[in-house]
Image (cartoon, rainbow, N blue to C red):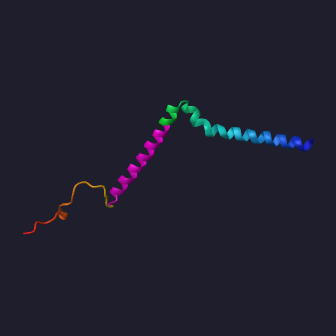
């Protein structure tokens, strides 16, 4: 009987720990409350990712690294007319 009681107490303690951890995992979805709120938070994450990518690319351009994104042509690379 004593062994069964120890297993029950250990099981209950384990469940309590899992429930406490689930609060932190599920909190963002509870705060959103609606599917639209969840989609909005995902859009914000995507916008943050895109902003970080843009800042990274701009920092690479400021370092003098070549940019292969097109744009204005360089006058020194213009073809010459043949006679």
User: Is residue 42 covered in magenta?
Assistant: yes
Dividing the picture into quadrants, the one containing residue 69 is bottom left
- Residue 79 place in picture, x, y as percent: 16, 65
Please name the residue shown 34% across and 59% down the image. 63
Q: In the rendered view of the protein, which quadrant contains the N terminus? A: top right
- Residue 28 place in picture, x, y as percent: 57, 36
- Residue 24 place in picture, x, y as percent: 63, 39
Report the magenta stretch's main SS. Answer: helix
Q: Residue furthest front?
A: 83
Q: Residue furthest bottom?
A: 83
Tally the numbered discs: 0
Q: Is residue 6 left or right of residue 58?
A: right
Q: In the rendered view of the protein, which quadrant contains the C terminus? A: bottom left
User: Is residue 15 covered in magenta?
Assistant: no
Dividing the picture into quadrants, the one containing residue 70 is bottom left
Please name the residue shown 46% across and 39% down the image. 44
Q: Is residue 57 left or right of residue 76?
A: right
Q: Residue furthest left?
A: 83
Q: Tell which of 58 and 7 is nearer to you.
A: 7
The span picked out in magenta is 41-64
Q: Is residue 35 left or right of residue 18?
A: left
Please name the residue shown 37% across and 53% down the image. 57
Q: Residue furthest right?
A: 1
Please name the residue shown 69% across and 38% down the image. 20
The answer to whether 11 is drawn above or below residue 56 in the figure is above
């Amino acid at each position: 009987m004593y062994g069964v009681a120890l297993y029950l107490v250990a099981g209950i303690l384990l469940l309590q720990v899992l429930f406490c951890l689930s609060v932190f995992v599920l909190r963002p979805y509870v705060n959103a409350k609606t599917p639209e709120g969840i989609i909005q938070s995902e859009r914000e994450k995507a916008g943050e990712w895109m902003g970080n990518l843009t800042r990274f690319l701009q920092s690479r351009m400021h370092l003098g690294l070549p940019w292969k994104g097109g744009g204005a042509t360089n006058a020194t690379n213009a073809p010459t007319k043949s006679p």
